[in-house]
Amino acid sequence: IVDIWQWTPFMLLVLYAGLLSLPREPFEAAKIDGASEWQLLKHLTIPLLIPIIVVVLLIRTMDIIKVFDTVYVLTRGGPGDATEVLTLYNFRVGLNYFYMGRAATISWIIAIFVILLAQLFFRILGTEFYKKRT
């Protein structure tokens, strides 16, 4: 619930800004051609918002991967290890048990995963831009 209250307004604000930045001409042309509001949403608004949605999802995904403070402050990973996330586990391995090599390895795995995920998101974004240009 804390995460929803923390990030939903920002994500909606970014999506709203993206919605305001859409060009008006395609919408006016579609209305002249007799398109309904549903057709405008399905065939114009959502496809034009896909790059913004991908960026919002990338930001949100990277934030989810690095979440530590909220879990640590609210539950410290408890009860038991029910709310333990990867970053909290890495913290415990490195600073509570002093397995520095294992903690460094976990950090590298997280970094490589984030880089691969970002490349996937940008590949999707690039594909959308490529489709629009051809």
Image (tube, rainbow, N blue to C red):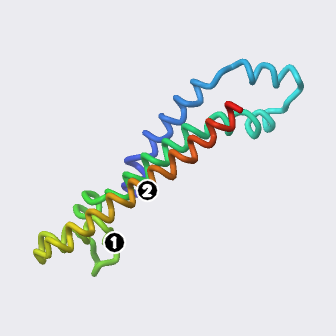
On residue 116, the disc is 2
Where does residue 127 sit, x and y in percent of width and height? 62, 43
Q: Amino acid at mark 2?
A: Leu
**What is the quadrant of the N terminus in the image?**
bottom left
Q: Amino acid at mark 1?
A: Thr
On the rendered structure, is 53 left or right of 23? Answer: left
On the rendered structure, is 66 left or right of 42? Answer: left
Name, please, the residue furthest toward the right. Answer: 34
Seen at 20% across and 74% down, the residue is 102
Disc 2 and disc 1: Cα gap in Å? 25 Å
Name, please, the residue furthest toward the bottom. Answer: 80
On the rendered structure, is 23 left or right of 41? Answer: left
Please report whichever mark, 2 or 1, sits nearer to the chain's N-terminal start.
1
Seen at 48% across and 35% down, the residue is 14
**Element assignment for label 2:** helix
Q: State the residue in front, 73 or 94.
A: 94
Residue 53 lies in quadrant: top right
On residue 83, the disc is 1
